[in-house]
Image: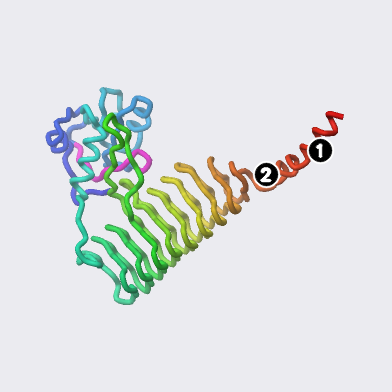
Amino acid sequence: MKFLKPIPVKEIAQRFNCEIIGNADLEATGINEIHKVEKGDITFVDHEKYYSQSINSAASIIIIDKRAEFPEGKALLLCENPFEVYNQIAKEHRPFEPLNSMISESAVIHPSSVLEPNVVVGHHVRIGKNCYIQANVFIGDYTVIGDNVTIQAGTVIGTDAFYHKKTEKGFEKWRSVGRVIIENDVEVGACCTINKGVSGDTIIGEGTKMDCQIHIAHGVVVGKKCLFAAQVGIGGKTILGDEVVLYGQVGIIHNLVIGDNVVVLAGAGVNKNLESGKIYFGAPASEARVKYRELAALKMLPDFMKRNRN
């Protein structure tokens, strides 16, 4: 998430009673989790295992719970509970706004687009030209929809990320301040769900076509001209290349990278990165030609064992 205007790091430190270590003249331009930070962003870390990754990321300002070495030019904000400070900054700069009408007054919808009955459009949504939004679709705050997009009945876009931090009090929900961006010429089937990012964007690339009952989790980036069949589920922050084909009931876990022109056959479970231009099958998924040989060998195993016993 980017701030409306830069915020001096001194102001943040004073507001949350943090000690500044390093460059006290910095200004924060946004806030983001470690996977998507850019120069000028604030991020946080509260576990030594991730200190190096966070401090050496693109982030300019790191909220941290202990002193640590860091590159010149950056700033650490030392405090007791970095997560609480981070989450509070997110809440204050993108506060909860209840929706009191079917279509928010702050939404911008091109007059050539068609919205059927009972479509709900949240605050600060932008919908481009020649879109067709069928009945009972929900479009959450800050969603951006390009031109020539079709969204079928019952789909829900821009819901909160399923993202919680385990604390002594239980699971504390992260404030979801990211967006969903749907590029031009995308088709989304009926009863799909697309979560917004925690602080970054969930992106559906230009020309992608999605069947019904598909779930896209927070921060997923889908490339251009992808094709997803029914009941596909993609875990948070996974990145898919261009022209990826996922057949029915494919499941992909979080934080993976799927290369360009990958095909994953129906019912597969993906738990590792997939190389470009290959066909995959099975659970866990592997190259289809290898997996089929494995299944053929497995089918012959009982006869093999019987012969060896005799």
Q: Which residue is mark 1?
A: 303
Image location of residue 9, percent across then percent down: 18, 37
Image location of residue 213, percent across then percent down: 46, 59
Amino acid type at mark 1? Asp
- In the figure, 254 relative to 78: above or below? below
Name the residue at 77% across, 37% down.
301
Colour scheme of the picture? rainbow
**Which residue occupies the foreground of this view, 229 or 76?**
229
Contact check, label 1 and label 2, Cβ < 8 Å: no
Judged from the image, the secondary structure of the residue bearing numbered disc 1 is helix
Whole-number angstrom distance, CA of label 1 to CA of label 2:
20 Å
Judged from the image, the secondary structure of the residue bearing numbered disc 2 is helix
Quarter the C terminus occupies: top right
Q: Which residues are magenta?
A: 26-36
Could one spot residue 65 in this view of the protein?
yes
106 within the magenta span: no
Name the residue at 20% across, 67% down.
105
Q: Which mark is residue 291?
A: 2
Q: Residues within 10 Å of mark 1 (few under 14, many from 20)?
A: few
Image location of residue 80, percent across then percent down: 21, 27
**Which residue occupies the foreground of this view, 129 or 175?**
175
Whichever of callouts 1 and 2 sits on the residue coming sooner in the sequence is: 2
30 within the magenta span: yes
Image location of residue 189, percent across then percent down: 45, 64
Q: Which mark is residue 8?
A: none
Amino acid type at mark 2? Lys
Residue 304 occupies quadrant:
top right
Horizontal side of residue 121 vs 154, given as left or right: left
